[in-house]
Amino acid sequence: MIRDNRHSIVIAALSLLASLAILAVDCTPKPESREPDVKYHEGRETLVAGEFGYNPISPMGVYMADPSAKVIDGKLYVACSLDLTMDTWCTPYHHMLSTEDVLHWTLHPNTFAAKGPYDEVSYSDAALYAPDIADKDGKYYLYYDLSEWTEGVAVADSPAGPYRDGRQIGDIRGIDPCVFIDDDGQAYYFWDQFSAQGAKLNDDMVTLDMSTLHQGIVTEDEHFFHEGSFVFKRNSWYYYVYADVSRQNMPSCIGYSMSRNVFGPYEYKGVIVDSAGCDPDVWNNHGSVVEFNGQWYVLYHRSTHHGSKLRKACIEPITFNEDGTINEVEMTSQGAGKPIPATSTIDAARACLVNGGPYVQLMEGRSDREVLSGVLDGSKAAWKYVDFPAGLKKFTIRVRTLAGGRIDVHQDQSFYGAVASVDVPAGKGEWLTLECDVDDVKEGPQALWFTFSGDWGSWRSPVELFEIDWFRFE
């Protein structure tokens, strides 16, 4: 009896600790936020999305999630879903990104739509969830899924679309399609949530051979599989990549399993990247792994606006071990590029880690500019990595005044001594450019941390100190 009571006490304690862990993720104090003025790009003219390969790779004010990357005709194409509000996942529109060097990105708006002037889904106006793309014999295929849990395919004459004539793929139900083409040219189709399914695609690339259906390829119980299937092959190993729930009881990770057979059995191997820490209310992740120009990358998304939506596509280089396993990487600001020069104007919205309140959101009155908001007493933010030259003398930062406070600037770790400190005056929302001297700056690539201090207010009504637009060293 005593043993049973002790067992019950242990179980209860563990349950309490698990609950507290969940609360620790969700209970960051939240200052009053504004409704984001997100604009929908109505046309199809291509736009410059980004330069230097920095994260996020989707441009400011454009919220592209679920990045599925494929190399087609010598370019890297990334098919994405599109977020427009903080209230719902995705929209009836798909945009795409492309690049020739992972440094300079092009945005292709409205490559496919289920509603509006570019509507190519005659049977539904539902939101389009995560897509994938594939090519065969000069034709390009976009595989889509609708919020009503049906899946379909559309065809184009160009990898960037426009994709036309959306048609449903049989009577299968689920989300997050993925197409993998093996070395022998056979195409496979994977989909679903919690327990993945897969089957061969027929030669027409638009119908499935259901006699080859496999269920439970990876599962939440055995592989931490939540959703977001992506399959690739390297050195005779098949990799099943997906949103992974192995940490913090949420699918914030991109995880993976490996097998010698495309349909498994798969063995869980770990996490590639974890987006926890990109936003106080981060929830899910969804991504892909691709080799391009001799380098392997993982693509994933981060949420913004102190929410789980309005997500932005990001990219990190990855490496493999001799046994085929993948080394976990951290989220960075530099992404696929080099460390960001300290003397350049660095957008605060490229922060890759936040703690204690801050988050990225649209600048008030702008739909094409993002800032770091939610700055509270005791909070901090990081940019990884920044390259510091010799001889730096001055630090300059553009801030929007609110309650006012102090910014301490650190290299490497947030608890190391400050190399610069700026006092931000209280104000009524004016934008100011402030300067201060810098001291004892280490040369070379370093993590850059800001720690913030000022009036705390109260837990129910935290005081927002200021917003940050950009900064630089001179």
Image: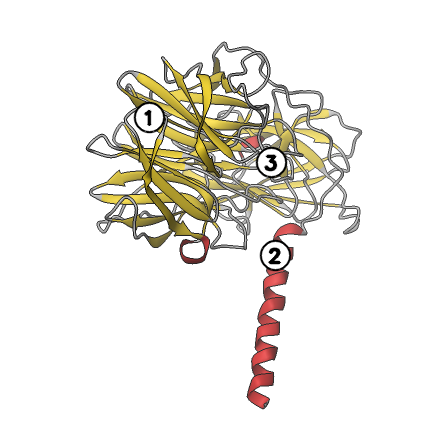
Q: Quadrant of residue 449?
A: top right
Residue 343 % position (x, y): 48, 27
Res. 22 mark: 2
Query: How far apart are labels 2 and 3 at the CA level?
Result: 19 Å
Q: Is residue 409 left or right of residue 99?
A: right
* 1 or 3: mark nearer the eye: 1
Q: Earlier in the sequence, mark 1 or mark 3?
A: 1
Residue 402 % position (x, y): 76, 34
Q: Earlier in the sequence, mark 1 or mark 2?
A: 2
Quarter of the image for the N terminus: give it: bottom right
Query: How far apart are labels 1 and 3 at the CA level?
Result: 32 Å
Residue 413 in sight in this render: yes
At label 1, the amino acid type is: Met
Residue 55 in sight in this render: no
Q: Residue at x 75, y 25 (%)?
A: 430
Residue where numbered disc 1 is placed: 205
Q: Is residue 208 left or right of residue 462?
A: left
Where disc 2 sits, the SS reads helix
Foreground of the two, 365 or 170:
170
Foreground of the two, 252 or 140:
140
Residue 96 % position (x, y): 45, 22
Q: Quadrant of residue 140?
A: top left
Where disc 3 sits, the SS reads loop
Q: Residue at x 67, y 29 (%)?
A: 399
Residue where numbered disc 3 is placed: 309
Res. 6 mark: none
Q: Earlier in the sequence, mark 2 or mark 3?
A: 2
